Amino acid sequence: MTTHFTKEAFETFQIDGLEQRMEAIRERIQPVFKQIGQEVLPDLTVHLAEDIYVHIAQHARRKVNPPNDTWMAFSPNKRGYKMLPHFQVGLFDDHLFIWLAYIYELPNKSQYATKLLQHQHILHTLPSDFVISYDHTYAQLVPIYKKIQ
């Protein structure tokens, strides 16, 4: 089994048709996600001082349009990840991403935003090539320093 993403993995997102693309995601990408999860999970659990679980996107609600990206999430909740801040590792056709994600199903989003704004000086300690995504399902990115200045 390959433990890295190949050119073929990125080319998956050029395949037409939901079933054909999903088959390629299952064959080319999800095995790598599983391997990454096995390797990273023990360290995340120790460093975050709580049990962490791997969730690999299944795109189960899709009925027509094939996904433009796919991801895995690391969350402290065994049943899901969308309702909590979580880490995502995923691919679009042209790049790999690693996010700390706060997505639409997260309750108390305004409290998280207020806390982030109170500590935005921490963002200035991140490398200048870090970016913000307003929606993880789209490839559009905003440079982090442009957004917080």
Image: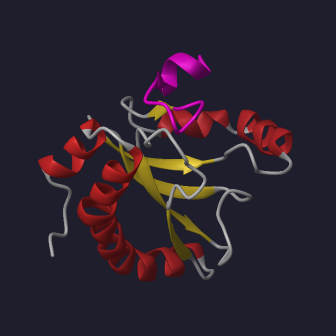
Residue placed at 48% from the left, 74% from the top?
44
Q: Is residue 125 magenta?
A: no
45 over 73 or under it: above or below: below
Q: Quadrant of the N terminus?
A: bottom left
9 shown above or below 54? above
Q: Nearer the viewer, residue 72 or 148?
A: 72
Q: Nearer the viewer, residue 64 or 25?
A: 64
Q: Position of residue 26 (x, y in %)?
A: 33, 64
Q: How many discs appear?
A: 0
Of residues 135 and 112, which is closer to you in this image? 135
Residue 36, located in which quarter of the rendered image?
bottom left
Q: Is residue 29 left or right of residue 37?
A: left
Across and down, in percent, residue 81 comes to: 64, 63
Q: Is residue 4 above or below residue 12?
A: below
Looking at the rendering, the stretch of residues picked out in magenta corresponds to: 133-149
Residue 110 appears in which quarter of the rendering? top right
Determine the residue positioned at 86% across, 48% down: 108
Location of residue 92 in the rendering, given as x and y in whole percent from the top left corner: 34, 40
Tell me what residue is drawn at x 35 percent, y 66 percent.
Answer: 33
Whole-percent x and y of residue 24?
27, 56
Residue 15 drawn above or below residue 89: above
Residue 120 versus residue 144: which sits nearer the camera?
144
Left or right of residue 66: residue 11: left
Q: Is residue 146 magenta?
A: yes
To which quarter of the image does residue 109 belong? Answer: top right
Colour mapping used in the image: secondary structure
> Where does the C terminus fall, quadrant-wise?
top right
Q: Is residue 1 left or right of residue 61?
A: left
In this rendering, position of residue 106 left or right of residue 38: right
Residue name at image x 57 percent, y 73 percent: 48
